[in-house]
Image: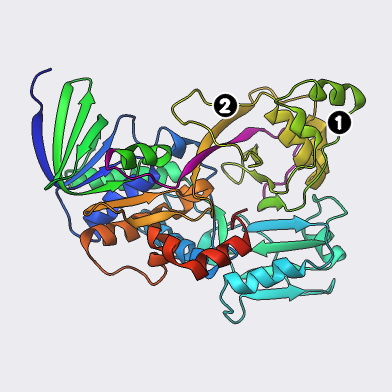
Amino acid sequence: MSAAAIDQVEVAVIGAGSVGIAVAYYLVVERGRRRVALIDCRPAMSFTSARSGENYRNWWPHPVMTAFTDHSISLMEQIDRASGSRLDMTRGGYALASRRERPEDLISSLYRGYDGAPGQVRLHESAAAEYRPSQRGPWADAPDGVDVLLNRALIRRNFPSFARDVASVIHIRRAGSFSAQQLGQFMLEALAEAGVRVRRAEVRAIAAAPAFDIEMTSEGGAQRVTAERIVNAAGPFVRDIGAMLGEDLPVRCVYQQKISFEDRSGAIPRDMPFAIDLDGQHLAWNDEERELLAGDPAARRLLEPMPGGVHCRPDGRVDGTRIKLGWAYNAQASDPHAEEPLDPNFPDVVLRAASRLYPALAAYVGRLPRGLHHYGGYYAMTEENWPLIGPMRTTGAFLAGALSGFGSMAACAAGSVCASWAAGSPVPDYAKALSGARHADAALMAELAQLGKGSL
């Protein structure tokens, strides 16, 4: 192999998914760095980022994650405003539905997530309660906070397509949908104007002394980049880059799936928010289906109690017809280097589960629509399901990863915070808790273990 040409940069960002692009973007536009390399062996945003649910929300069961996503949404709004609504941000909210009459634990988690901010949590217990219904309209016109509907008549009036046994709805208002691809494209264009383009090359080795010497291969042959600092934003492959630096990152990859299709029967009204069924369930199978599933070791679990979290929403334009369904019930880690483990049962499974919340979807069970798109992506995640953004143990190396199923909605804040870490600039108050330093904070880790996974 011929000797590789050596390029010298200030910061090398490894990974050109939504998060890596955002790190490079904020290094350039916020921190004034110009010698930035953005490296990926694939086209930008063509792997996990291409499978984004393109949803966002600002509520989580812990104020750190709420502050983090609030920051990211504000940054997205800045870009949407500056680009003439290019991100197509809608603000229909998230509607979390349950058959529990008054889920006190969930209501308490709302107050905890919003850190007790006054007026953020509004309880509606009367059929005549003043409640502003959902509209998938512009984000600037939407309310903030969360509305908790605890009256069945009020729920039926405002969510008539929900099953009649739904007894409570938590409507998170600073939430909705956006175009993750347009967000990434906007950033890539700004980077190109600053002279930063994606370098299509595969990182093969990294030496860390005194500067980082990055060996890469591409169609054009061997390449080398030396960098004063590096950012590991390699998505499902963050552990690979970590291993090149002698670090074993506490991240695993879990493959989750979605479907989308033309909702010709109008089962989900176009003005509905992103809806999540919080309740677990037993899927409804007939005797023949049960026998078939029982005989398949890979599918047998579908006969057992299934977790909550199946979600549905109108997809694309408000005047369109496509809908999107997902259910992150898989808990088994996968190797992102292997063939993607698409489950042929998933479309039927998610339709059956979603039809409990939206009964009209039952018309599609056993009659999957033509043109249905079944796809998936890897959730790179820590055990506590919080991201890792900040310094690695290797001096001069930084990490922006483990963003699980919230990478697109959190990309802006993840990029801004990681860029600040890498540039030696001040970071937000919440940032330390999202870095690897939290694993040394016994009190915080105990709190997160008490909360559970912390994600819907």
- For the point 79% across and 45% down, the residue is 358
The one of 101 and 141 positioned closer to us in this rendering: 101
Residue 201 position, x and y percent, is 25, 29
- For the point 60% across and 46% down, the residue is 318
Judged from the image, the secondary structure of the residue bearing numbered disc 1 is loop
Looking at the rendering, the stretch of residues picked out in magenta corresponds to 244-273
- For the point 69% across and 57% down, the residue is 95
Horizontal side, residue 76 vs residue 112: left or right: left
Judged from the image, the secondary structure of the residue bearing numbered disc 2 is loop
Horizontal side, residue 341 vs residue 295: left or right: left
Q: Is residue 258 magenta?
A: yes
Residue 326 lies in quadrant: top right
Residue 103 lies in quadrant: bottom right
Q: Which mark is residue 113?
A: none
Name which of mark 1 and mark 2 comes first in the sequence. 1
- Distance between the Cα atoms at labels 1 and 2? 24 Å
Residue 375 position, x and y percent, is 57, 30
Mark 2 surroundings within 10 Å by alpha-carbon count, few (fewer than 14), some (14 through 19), many (20 or more): some
Q: Which residue is mark 1?
A: 285
Residue 236 position, x and y percent, is 43, 38
Which residue reaches farthest top?
1
The one of 455 and 161 positioned closer to us in this rendering: 455
Mark 1 surroundings within 10 Å by alpha-carbon count, few (fewer than 14), some (14 through 19), many (20 or more): few
Residue 186 in sight in this render:
no
Residue 130 position, x and y percent, is 75, 74
Q: Is residue 280 magenta?
A: no
**In this figure, which colouring scheme has been used for the structure?**
rainbow
| Residue type pointed to by label 1 | Trp
Residue 419 lies in quadrant: bottom left
Q: Which mark is residue 341?
A: 2
Count of numbered badges drawn on the protein: 2
